[in-house]
Amino acid sequence: MIFRTHGTCSSAIHLELDSDHIIRSVSFDGGCNGNLKGISKLVTGMKAEDVIDKIEGTTCGFKNTSCPDQLAKALRACLAQEA
């Protein structure tokens, strides 16, 4: 799945989940390269629901969202597609 982000320096999130909602891969277009590579490594292998619980609502500076918050939205969208 490709999720187009809103309100962040990254423009898109590429996401793959398996049938058990385990995150198989995550990559970002744009944004803070090192930080987003680190986030991708940290969440790969985790259940989508657990990641959503941890990062949803994270803000970046004065913005009301962030790349982690957008990842939570992407995961929710991916889970909704499966339903």
Image (cartoon, rainbow, N blue to C red):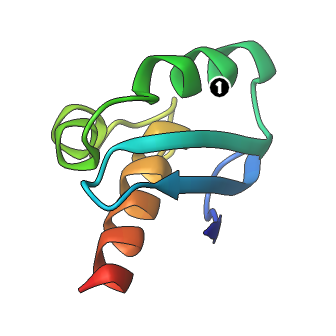
* Front in this rendered view, residue 70 or 42: 42
* Front in this rendered view, residue 52 or 5: 52
Position of 52 compared to 37: left or right? left
Residue 2 image offset from top left, x and y in percent: 67, 68
Position of 74 compared to 46: left or right? right
Is the N terminus in the top left, top right, bottom left or bottom right quadrant? bottom right
- Hey, which quadrant is residue 53 in on the image? top left
Crowding near the residue tagged with mark 1, few <14, some 14–19, many ≥20 C-alpha atoms within 10 Å: some
Give the residue drawn at x 36%, y 51%.
72
- State the residue lying farthest toward the right: 30
Q: How many marks?
A: 1
The amino acid sitting under disc 1 is: Leu
Residue 70 image offset from top left, x and y in percent: 48, 53
* Front in this rendered view, residue 4 or 20: 20
Location of residue 55 with respect to 70 vertically, above or below: above
Location of residue 34 with respect to 36 vertically, above or below: above
- Hey, which quadrant is residue 19 in on the image? bottom left
**Label 1: which secondary element:** helix
Residue 28 image offset from top left, x and y in percent: 72, 43
Give the residue drawn at x 75%, y 24%.
32
Position of 2 compared to 11: left or right? left
Give the residue drawn at x 31%, y 70%.
79
Is the C terminus in the top left, top right, bottom left or bottom right quadrant? bottom left
Give the residue drawn at x 60%, y 41%.
26
Q: Which residue is mark 1?
A: 36
Residue 67 visible in image: yes
Residue 64 visible in image: no
Residue 46 image offset from top left, x and y in percent: 30, 31
